[in-house]
Amino acid sequence: MILYPAIDLKDGQCVRLLRGAMDAATVFNDDPAAQAVAFQDAGCEWLHLVDLNGAFAGAPVNAGAVEAILAAVDVPAQLGGGIRDMATIERWLDRGLARVILGTAAVDDPGLVREAASAFPGQVAVGIDARAGRVATRGWAEETEIGATDLARRFEDAGVAAIIYTDIDRDGAMQGPNVEATAALAHAVRIPVIASGGVSSLDDLRALRDCGAPLGGAISGRALYDGAIDLRAALDIMKP
């Protein structure tokens, strides 16, 4: 399993939200590129980036911060937030992103996901953000009646690289991930699932690692910034 440290970008700063609320942001670093370098230097193999403003705006907003990160590190990075057309996908991949994450587009424009996954094999992931098992879109501001597993199954044959599954009610709350729901999703589809939301201790990482489902990784943010998770110890736990 891969540990993906999260760098969530709001107004050019590295922040963490509580359950997706933009007015509940805590700034952890005003230099996202420096934070990315620190994660790389600690041994992280990937970075997970989110353009929070972009998720609401429907277009990239923190492009400058993302480009600074890409220029500063050598490890691959994936980005979600405001990526909703082929032109934006192509632009980000051309600028050095290893993977784009399509969330709202997966609900509103599934054809885009299929087109992008076909055009860029291994470089397109689907972000499924759920509250009580139902998918939310547009920065989690709009809830749908679509079940997380139902949405994932729609892309079984599309060639997407991964599904990033976030339990919104756990995100930033330091209450542990929804291991049961994450494992159930991973068992239900053949696409690798990356767990996100609530990972707040080494025990949480062990629980995900040992849940019996073929998870592809786990994302952690606030716990790394707060020091609740020792990054080097976490990386050791995630080693095969």
Image (tube, helix red, strand yellow):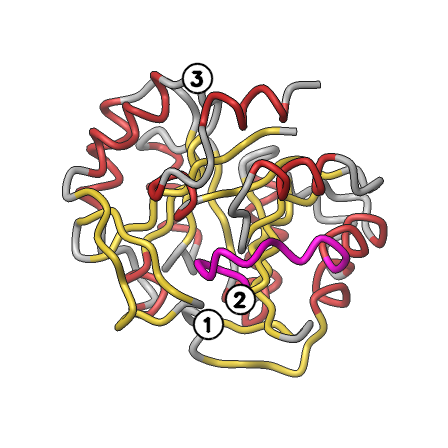
Nearer-the-camera pick, 120 or 100:
100
Does label 1 or label 3 sit earlier along the sequence?
3
Q: Residue at x 55, y 48 (%)?
A: 199
- Residue 51, compared with residue 78, is above or below; it is below
* Location of residue 181 (image quadrant): bottom right
What is the x, y in percent for residue 139? 41, 68
**Mark 1 to mark 2: distance in Å?**
8 Å
Indicate the quadrant containing the N terminus: top left, top right, bottom left or bottom right.
top right
Magenta-colored span: 170-181
Q: Residue at x 35, y 61 (%)?
A: 17
**Location of mark 3 (residue):** 43
Q: Disc 1 marks which amino acid? A: Trp
- Residue 140, compared with residue 26, is above or below; it is below
Q: Disc 3 marks which amino acid? A: Gly
Where disc 1 sits, the SS reads: loop
What is the x, y in percent for residue 164? 59, 50
**Location of mark 2 (residue):** 168
